[in-house]
Amino acid sequence: MSSTLEQKLNWLKEQGHAPLLTKLQHGLEKEGLRVDPQRKLAQTPHPESLGSALTHGNITTDYSEALLEFITPVFEQSSDALAFLADLHRYTFKNLGEEQLWPASMPCILPAEADIPIARYGSSNVGTMKYVYRVGLEHRYGKVMQTIAGIHYNFSLPEAFWPVYQEYCEDHRELQDFRSAGYFSLIRNFRRYSWLLIYLFGASPALCKSFLDGKPHQLQELSPDTLYLPYATSLRMSDLGYSNKAQSSLNICFNHLNTYASSLDRAIRTPYAEYEKIGIKVDGEYRQLNANVLQIENEYYSDIRPKRVTRSGEKPIHALMTRGVEYIEVRNTDINPFLPVGIDQPQADFLDLFLISCLLMEEKEISTDECEQISENHQRVVTRGREPGLSLIHNDRERSLQAWGHELLTEIEKTAALMDQAEGSSRYADSIQVQRAKLDDASLTPSAMLLAALQESGLGYNDFIMQQAEKHRETLLAEPMDADMEQTLITLSASSLQEQAEIEAADTMDFDSYLQDYMSH
């Protein structure tokens, strides 16, 4: 009996639709801390030569003033997104002076919590709102959590794919509703199987002691400044130092767009007692945007999100509900400290295969019990993923991670065969072989390689990651970027500063009224 995935792939092949899968849409977002020569979090403002963090489309900041975020345009080829990301690094290196870009997900040496600078976006209402939102995150979760960095992989199928797929499914809904349902099916299967991505690509098994300064934890000491768990894959994706009772009560399992959106909508409108104690505006200073379970939708943390590009002033939920899901954002990707930009082509190829397979696999809803099993599997893999003989819960039974992983790769291999045939290459099959080797030999995973490198070099976490930062900077600058590209980025930086100034000059409303108006819609 062939699998649902196999049947759909065969149909795409027989009907001549396979080339549609070569026209995927890709975008990358990558965070990275600026650090000073002493391996400490930079205390300097966002470099003006990088433009305005408020209005620059490709270089901005995330939580902290020191946490850069690079955003690529959307490309059909993931290789183009990776090349653009590399150029953003090159441009930034030229404008960082003595500072370095930290090439790991877990942060460098952190100062006292009060001295972690929150990102600033100027004096406009929209800039102030971004700042106050981050002040709210500080009061709710602390600042240390917010210095963790990751890579977001944005992915969508070409628009021409959906009518063809709808015909195969004999579905008679509006195309927009069918497409949204398809993406939600992808998301559910992603959540079932994303433990595999964390095992294969997790790269944060260790961290700097300053991250947990004075807090209770279960980690072991690897060196005087380094804590770790021997079989961990991704401490970034664990609940380390991050417990969020308010969010766990949301219990969002992504069965349908309308239930997902209504859960989020309820959360941004429902007051939460713990947050009410913080206060909203105290002694004339804002502490948070509101005292609700979520200040805004983006506060909800998930390893994958359905997305739709918003219009000016539009809330993400409204965009999703009115125009449907446009793409998905994969958020569980650690920065690999061995790679110049933290991710490479074989990993991008495997992510494409994984996501296409999740879309075309069986469309099952997630029950409350399965939701709990997904959380348990996630927890086991982030903290103990490389433990010999580790088992996960599959269909209510314990099952070996290796056996289940190989079974999934055998399924995904069928997608690879179709993709390679459509492209006339072997790169997709090759990317599967690289992952198979990691299942057979855990020492080949990035998390194991990082621990081995720390042990063999005798360096602590901070010294080793700083050494990698210097190496990657040299590697990337050894290949200069195209002069036109550099000029484009110089122009963008200047025009973004001008745009910020214009937004500030155009504001006519005071911030209290602006916030009230935004929250009331």
Image (tube, helix red, strand yellow):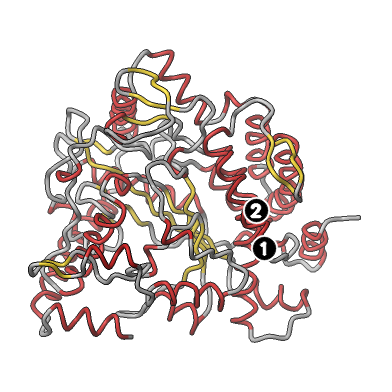
Please determine whether, in this image, residue 375 is positioned above or below residue 73.
above
Q: Which image quadrant: the N terminus?
A: bottom right
* Image coords of residue 35 (percent x, y): 21, 37
* Image coords of residue 263 (percent x, y): 49, 73
Q: Give 78 or 507, whichever is nearer the viewer.
A: 507
The residue labelled by disc 2 is: 192
State the SS at label 2: helix
Which residue is at a point 24% across and 85% down the rendered structure image? Answer: 517
Please determine whether, in this image, residue 161 is positioned above or below residue 348.
below
Q: Is residue 357 left or right of residue 139?
A: right
Which residue is at a point 41% across and 61% down the rendered structure image? Answer: 246
Determine the image quadrant of residue 241. top left
Q: Are marks 2 and 1 in contact (CB under 8 Å)?
A: yes
Residue type beneath disc 1: Ile
Category of crowding for the residue at label 2, using alpha-carbon neighbours closer than 10 angstroms: few (below 14), some (14–19), many (at least 20):
many
Category of crowding for the residue at label 1, using alpha-carbon neighbours closer than 10 angstroms: few (below 14), some (14–19), many (at least 20):
some
Mark on residue 366? 1
* Image coords of residue 334 (percent x, y): 45, 42
The answer to whether residue 353 is seen in the rendering is no
* Image coords of residue 90 (percent x, y): 28, 43
Which residue is at a point 12% across and 68% down the rendered structure image? Answer: 498
Please determine whether, in this image, residue 157 is positioned above or below residue 222.
below
Residue type beneath disc 2: Arg
The answer to whether residue 283 is seen in the rendering is yes
Determine the image quadrant of residue 430. top right
State the SS at label 1: loop
